[in-house]
Amino acid sequence: MSDEIVNRVANSALIAIDLADYAPSQSIAVLDVKDFLFQEIILKEKEFRANLKEFDFSIYQDKIIAINCSSDAIVPMWAFMLVTSYLKGIASKIHFGKKEDVFQQIFTANIDAIDSTEFESKKVIVKGCGQVPLSASLYMAITKKLQDTVSSLMFGEACSAVPVLKNK
């Protein structure tokens, strides 16, 4: 009998996926429409348009922008359209919502863009711990993406994996 320690996990056919690898790499800047409103709650069209015209949008150069309105103002849809038009050619991407929601949207889009054929008929384990906070919706997204492709899908670490599904 040999005293050699063998790393069976490293020698196994398991493929580990760390969802953090698909997190948005670019920072997300927030553009709050309330900053362009009269007293931060009333949209006066003429004043709104003037405020946008005077604003230096170059601070959003090459950034992902989350546009929202944090006040209880009633903001018509055309106002968001107008703000978006000012960001054309400046921002790399423009989304509506809070910063956290936009982060989740981009994260999910990155998971949806995975080429699932590279995991075809493989045993895949999705890591459960990491530095980036992950929501249940991201774990659901990777499951939906891979469930028809992999031979088995697990959650956790190789030493303590929880089986999620097994295909024949």
Image (cartoon, grey):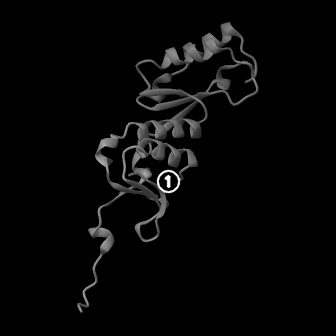
Q: Amino acid at mark 1?
A: Val
Q: Residue at x 56, y 14 (%)?
A: 81
Residue that appears at 40% across and 67% down? 158
Q: Position of residue 120 (x, y in %)?
A: 31, 47
SS for tag 1? loop
23 above or below 156?
above
Q: Residue at x 68, y 14 (%)?
A: 76
Using a 10 Å C-alpha cutoff, classify the residue at mark 1 as few (fewer than 14 neighbours), some (14 to 19) or many (20 or more).
few
Is 140 in front, or is 33? 140
- Name the side, left or right, on which 62 lies relative to 101: left
Image quadrant in which you'd find residue 41: top right
The percent position of residue 14, horizontal first and vertical second, equals: 33, 61
Residue 82 image-quadrant placement:
top right
Above or below 29: residue 142? below
Q: Nearer the viewer, residue 55 or 62?
A: 62
Give the side of residue 7 with respect to residue 165, left or right. Answer: left
User: Which residue ends up furthest to the front in the rendered image?
Assistant: 168
Q: Position of residue 86 (x, y in %)?
A: 50, 16
Q: Relative to 113, does residue 53 appear above or below in the rendering?
A: above
Task: Say which residue appears at 40% left-offset and 19% top-offset.
Answer: 89
Q: Say which quarter of the image contains residue 53.
A: top right
If the image is split into quadrants, where does the N terminus sit? bottom left
Q: Nearer the viewer, residue 44 or 10?
A: 10
Q: Report the residue marked by disc 1.
A: 132
